[in-house]
Image: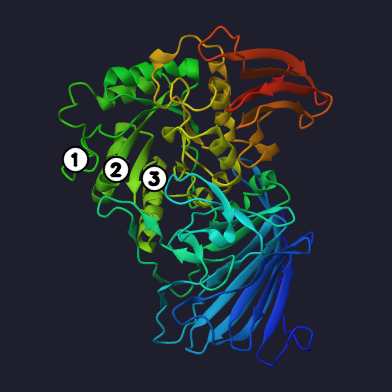
Amino acid sequence: MTRVWSVFSVVFAGAALCAAADAFEARVSSPDGSVSVRFSLGKDGRPAYSVAADGRPLVLPSRLGFQPNLLDGFTRVGDSRCSVRESWEFQFGERRDIPDAYEGLTVELRHESGARLNVELRAYDEGAAVRYLFPVEQPDGVELRFDGEHTEFRLPAGAEAYEEHGTEGPYRLTPVSAIAPYCERPLTVALPGGGYAAVCEAGNTDYARMMLSPLAGVEGALVSALGGATTNTEAENQRHDPSVTMRPGQATPWRVLLVGKTPGELLENNYLLLNLSPPSRLSDTSWIKPGKVMRAGLTSDSGKQVIDFAKTAGLDYVHFDAGWYGPERARSSDATRVAPDRASELDLREVVQYGADRGVGVLVYVNQVALKRQLDDILPLYQDWGLKGIKYGFVPVGPQAETRWLTESFAQAAEHRLMINVHDGFRANGITRTYPNLMTVEGIRGNERMPTAEHNCTLPFTRYLCGVGDYTVCYYNNRIKTTHAHELAMAVVSFSPLQWIFWYDSPGHYRGEPEVEFFREVPTVWDETRVLEGEIGAYATIARRSGKQWFVGMINANQPRNASLPLDFLPPGAKFDATLYYDDPDAPTRTHVGLRRQQVTAGSTIDVELPVAGGAALWIRPTAGQ
C-alpha cells in the first residue's frame, strides 16, 4: 500500500477567488483532473458546492446545510487540502484490489450561533463526495440537533433519471424535474449530451437514511430527504421523523456522485462507496465464508435433502425461512427454540450436525419482532447451536435510531461469528467494508417478485451501484419471465457473497440438467469485475474473475440480439477451456439450455444468439497442463 499525504493551510486573496471580503471560493480536482469539486461561501454566509466532469457541469451550484437554521450566517475560519494515493484489498467484494486516490478540501466554518461545522469535499477520478463534520470544539450550550439535512443536487437542464420508490420498486426513466418525493438511491442520471452519473450515499453507520425529494421552487433539482418511508409491524408506510442528532467529533455519511461515460463505468467505479466507508471493525474475518444458499422446507427431512443436493449444485448453506420458530410477526413467537407445533418434524440441531458432517452450514430467518426483543439471547445461542448466520426480516430502516441499531447488531453478530443478510428496505452503501459479516441485503426487486428481463437489465446500472443485493435467483419455477439461460447468467450479474439460488425450488425439481454445473462452479465473490457492454434496460454483459477463472453473465431484454463477445480480457498467450450455456429451443431438456464447449484464447470471439428475455453464461478456465 502506498500513501501520500499533503496537508496545508490555504489562504485565498485577490479578486480571482474572493468576490468580497466575506465571500470565499475554492476548487479541488481529481488526480487526473477529470473531476472537479468547487466550494463557495456567499456574502450571506450560505455554503454551496458544485461538481464538473471533463469540463461539463454535473451538479450546478447547490446549497449545503441543516434545517431549520444552519443554512446561512457562516463565516470561514480556515481550510486545508489533502492528497491521497493508496490501495487496499477486499476479499468479500466485486474486486480484490481497490484503488483509493483523491484530492480533498476541508473548509472550516463558524455559524453565527457559534456552532462549528466543517465541510469536507473530495474529487476522485471516479466521482465526487461531500460530507459534514462537527469539530470536537463546540461552544457551550450549542445543541447539534436538526430537523433535517439540506444538501441540494441541482442537475443540468434536460437530465433524466431512473426513478425508484419503495423497498422493491420497479424503475422508470423520467425527467429529473418530474421525480416524486422520497425517491430511492442510488439514483442513476442520464446526462444531456451523453454520459452518466449516480447520486449515492456512503459511510452511514449512525445517521438517518438519505433519500431524494424535489427541491421546492427549483426546476430539475433534488434535495436530501432523511428518513423516508418504511414498513414495519407498527405502522405501514409511516413517514419517519427526519431529525438527526450529532455529537462533537461526528461526521455525516458521504453524499456521493459516481460518474461514467457509460452505464458500465458506473458499476466498475462503485468501489468508491467502499472507500468512503470506515475500514473493517472486525479483527478476525477468517470465519466468514461466502457461498451459495438454498432454502429448505421447515422439516429436518427437507433440510437434509438440500444438504444431499449440495454436491450437485455447489451449495454451501441450507436456509430455514420464516415460520420455523412460529408466526414471524407474533410477539408470542420465541426465536430461541423451534415452534412447538413443528418440533416433531424439525430438529434444527440434528440438521446442523448432518450438514457439518458434509461441509454444509445452516442459516435461519428471524423477523425484526423477535430480533429487537431477543437479540442478546439468540446470538450466543445460535453460535452454540452451530448456526452460521441469520437472515433479518422486515427490519425498519430510515430513522437514525434504526441505523444505529442495525450497525450495533452487525458488531454483536460478529462477536458470535454469525453472518447477516438484511431484508427488506436496507441497502448496504459500502458498510460491508466496515462489517464484512454483513454478507448481503435485499432492498431489491428480485426474483421473489418475478421481475421482467428489462428490470434485470436495469439493476446492474442502478441498484447494484450500491453493492450487494439478495436477488434470490430462481430456476425451475414456471413463473419466471425470462429464459433459463438468463437465470444462469443472473448468478454472475447479481453480486451477493451469500447467493440464494433455486428460490421457490426443491432438490426434487432437478432432473439431471447438465447446465446446473454452472451454478455448482460459479463463485460469489470476485477478484476482478468488468462490464463488457450494457445499455440500461436493454442488455448487460458482465465478466468476473476468480483466480484464473472467468465467469460471464449475458442478459437480454425486449429485443433479440446477435451478440459477438471478444475475449480480449483474457491474458494473452494462454489457452483456456470455455463452456457456453445458451438458449437452445432444440436442447432435449425442459430448460432448453444448450452447452457448447471449445478452446479459446484472448483472440477468440464468442458468438451467441440472445432471444427476447434470454441470456447466456460462460465459464472459462485455464486448459489443463498450463
Q: In the image, is residue 432 above or below residue 470? A: below
Where is residue 284? Give x, y as percent.
48, 44
- Residue 592 or residue 104, whichever sits in front: 592
Residue beneath the point at 62% across and 49% down = 270
- For residue 333, the mark is 1
Total marks drawn?
Answer: 3
Marks 3 and 1 sit apart, C-alpha to C-alpha, by: 20 Å
Q: Residues within 10 Å of mark 2 (few under 14, many from 20)?
A: many
Where is residue 440? Give x, y as percent.
47, 41
User: For this view, does 298 lie left or right of residue 40?
Assistant: left
- For residue 424, the mark is 3
Residue beneath the point at 30% across and 40% down = 366
Question: SS at mark 2?
Answer: strand
> Is disc 3 in contact with disc 1, using a CB cutoff of under 8 Å?
no
Q: Which residue is denoted by mark 2 in the rendering?
A: 367
Amino acid at dot 3: Asp
Residue 153 visible in the current orientation? yes
User: For this view, does 458 lie left or right of residue 339?
Assistant: right
- Residue 47 or residue 585, whichever sits in front: 585
User: For this view, does 116 lie left or right of residue 545?
Assistant: left
Amino acid at dot 1: Ser
Residue beneath the point at 66% across and 38% down = 529
Question: SS at mark 1?
Answer: loop
Question: SS at mark 3?
Answer: strand
Screen quadrant of the C terminus: top right
Q: In the image, is residue 319 above or below residue 146? A: above
> Is disc 2 in contact with disc 1, using a CB cutoff of under 8 Å?
yes
Upstream in sequence: badge 3 or badge 1: 1
Marks 2 and 1 sit apart, C-alpha to C-alpha, by: 10 Å
